[in-house]
């Protein structure tokens, strides 16, 4: 019976792997069921041991009764009471029959208890194997789940695509930098032009002033020369008079 039970445990634990929806949960539940069964077998072994102890106690009590009634029969004979001795011997035989039956029953119970102990040891070994396998499978399942999630993320996230995005952003940033630099250069050129216009106008104004001075000087000279000639002529006329 226990060999079939152990085989059933193995088959149950292994068959779970083929129909797992949540491997970790199923493994934990299956191991719990196996452990519960082992606990039940352990309780059965404890009960068998208790029955064996009880039979041993009953056997010893009956052996003590055999000795007691043997002593009583001897006492009755010594007192010359054969009738009482016969009754004591009859009672002794009853206890002896019980002793014989109990010895046979005890021997059978000891063999059953021994078998139960051996099967319990085997089941506990199977339970330990199941625990080790459970832990290993849970670890493998967690690793597979983590790998699956990582692969899922990788399938949605392309390094090339990310680099392309970064490259595009780099180009946009560079374009903005160039634009800002161009605007700065344009602003600088405008400022230079404004100052150059001022400088150019200043040169023209200076040149214009110089030209005006020169023209004014020429006009003054031109006006002054006729007056000098006129005065010279007057001076000559006065001298002749």
Image (spheres, grey):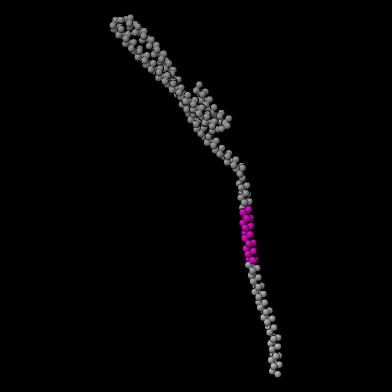
Is 203 above or below relative to 89? below
- Extreme residue toward the left, this view: 79
State whether the magenta stretch is mostly helix, strand or loop: helix
Where, quadrant-wise, is the C terminus in this rendering?
A: bottom right
Horizontal arrangement in the rendering, residue 240 relative to residue 38 (left or right):
right
Residue at x 33%, y 12% (from the top left corner)? 68
Regarding residue 220, the answer to whether it shows in the image is yes
Regarding residue 119, the answer to whether it shows in the image is no
Residue at x 65%, y 77% (from the top left corner)? 210
Q: How far across and down, in percent of the image, does residue 147 sit?
A: 57, 39
Q: How far across and down, in percent of the image, does residue 54 sit?
A: 40, 18
Q: How far across and down, in percent of the image, does residue 60 sit?
A: 37, 16
Q: Quadrant of residue 71?
A: top left
- Extreme residue toward the bottom, this view: 241
Q: In the rendered structure, does residue 189 fall within the stretch colored magenta?
A: yes
Q: Quadrant of residue 111?
A: top left
Q: How many marks?
A: 0
Residue at x 61%, y 45% (from the top left corner)? 158
Is 217 above or below relative to 80? below
Q: In the rendered structure, does residue 48 fall within the stretch colored magenta?
A: no
Is 93 above or below relative to 143? above
Q: Nearer the viewer, residue 202 or 55?
A: 202
Horizontal arrangement in the rendering, residue 64 relative to residue 202 (left or right):
left
Q: Which residues are magenta?
A: 172-194
- Extreme residue toward the front, this view: 241
Q: How far across and down, in percent of the image, does residue 118 sit?
A: 46, 24
Q: Quadrant of residue 16?
A: top right
Residue at x 58%, y 39% (from the top left corner)? 148
Horizontal arrangement in the rendering, residue 179 relative to residue 85 (left or right):
right
Q: Nearer the viewer, residue 56 or 171?
A: 171
């Amino acid at each position: 019976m226990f060999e079939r039970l152990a085989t059933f445990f193995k088959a149950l634990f292994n068959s779970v792997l083929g129909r797992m929806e949540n491997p970790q949960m199923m493994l934990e539940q299956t191991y719990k069921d196996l452990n519960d069964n082992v606990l039940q077998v352990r309780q059965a072994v404890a009960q068998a041991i208790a029955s064996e102890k009880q039979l041993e106690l009953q056997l010893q009590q009956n052996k003590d009764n055999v000795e007691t009634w043997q002593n009583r029969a001897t006492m009755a004979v010594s007192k010359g009471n054969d009738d009482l001795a016969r009754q004591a011997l009859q009672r002794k035989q009853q206890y002896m029959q019980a002793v014989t039956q109990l010895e046979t029953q005890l021997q059978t119970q000891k063999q059953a208890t021994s078998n139960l102990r051996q099967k319990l040891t085997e089941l506990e070994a199977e339970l330990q194997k199941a625990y080790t396998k459970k832990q290993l499978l849970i670890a493998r399942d967690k690793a597979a789940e983590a790998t699956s999630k990582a692969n899922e993320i990788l399938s949605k996230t392309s390094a090339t695509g990310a680099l392309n995005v970064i490259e595009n952003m780099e180009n946009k940033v560079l374009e903005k930098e160039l634009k800002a630099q161009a605007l700065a250069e344009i602003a600088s050129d405008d400022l230079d032009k404004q100052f150059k216009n001022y400088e150019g106008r200043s040169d023209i104004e200076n040149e214009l002033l110089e030209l005006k001075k020169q023209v004014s000087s020429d006009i003054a000279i031109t006006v002054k020369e006729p007056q000098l000639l006129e005065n010279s002529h007057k001076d000559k006329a006065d001298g002749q008079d």
